[in-house]
Image (spheres, grey):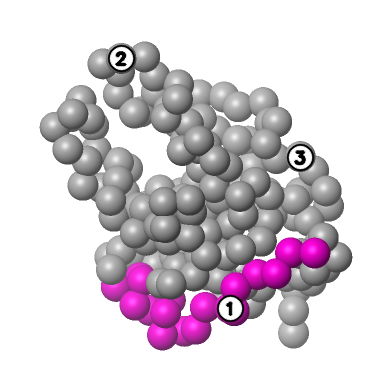
Amino acid sequence: MRDSLITALLERTYLGGQTPEQPASAAQVSKVEGQLGFPLSPTLKRILSEVGNGGFGPGYFLMGIDNGFPDDRGETIEKWYLSQRNLGPDDYGWCWPEGLLPFCHWGCGIYSLVDVTKANEPILRFDPNEPSENESYEKCLFSEGYLLRDWLFAWAQGKDLWNLELSK
């Protein structure tokens, strides 16, 4: 039985003319969780496996996993995350936080992220256009003031999630 979030997302997606990727299979989810070394959040896992493996939602759409819908650089959630975890010496010694996964691409290198290390699944925004020269990418992370389930419901109900008041 579908819960109200899945129903709301499917309605908004199809009524809005969006065509999500085929839902992710259990094998794809398991493969990606193995690559990441930790599980996807329960809500993210359900969205990817019940609504679609990316290709719908706000901005330039939700990203998928394992050959699902990519961002503009061709990266899926796990590929983007793993590339960020391997930052080089030009990144001012900063290491991408464990469990902070991109799931929505806004363009210009900006992403909404879900912190899967926290049970309530808080959402942050990564905007690499924010720091000045020689500043850490840590200064590029802002709270969107939402938890993942609420963020998805807000989009399904027509809220503009791009123009949020962001906070440090």
Give the amino acid at mark 1.
Answer: Pro
Q: Secondary structure at mark 3?
A: loop
In the rendered view, tell whether residue 118 sits above or below residue 28.
above
Q: Residue at x 65, y 70 (%)?
A: 20
Q: Which residue is mark 3?
A: 160
Query: Where does the image place residue 150, in percent across and percent down from the top left?
Result: 70, 51
Q: Residue at x 30, y 14 (%)?
A: 133
Return the mark for residue 23: 1
Which residue is situated farthest in the left direction here?
Answer: 89
Q: Residue at x 26, y 47 (%)?
A: 85
Residue 39 in view (yes/no): yes
Relative to residue 38, is residue 8 drawn left or right? right
Ranked by sequence position, the earlier of labels 2 and 3 is 2
Query: Where does the image place residue 115, in percent across and percent down from the top left?
Result: 46, 49
Q: Secondary structure at mark 1?
A: loop
Give the amino acid at mark 2.
Answer: Glu
Query: Where does the image place residue 72, in percent across and percent down from the top left?
Result: 48, 51
Residue numbers of the magenta segment: 17-34
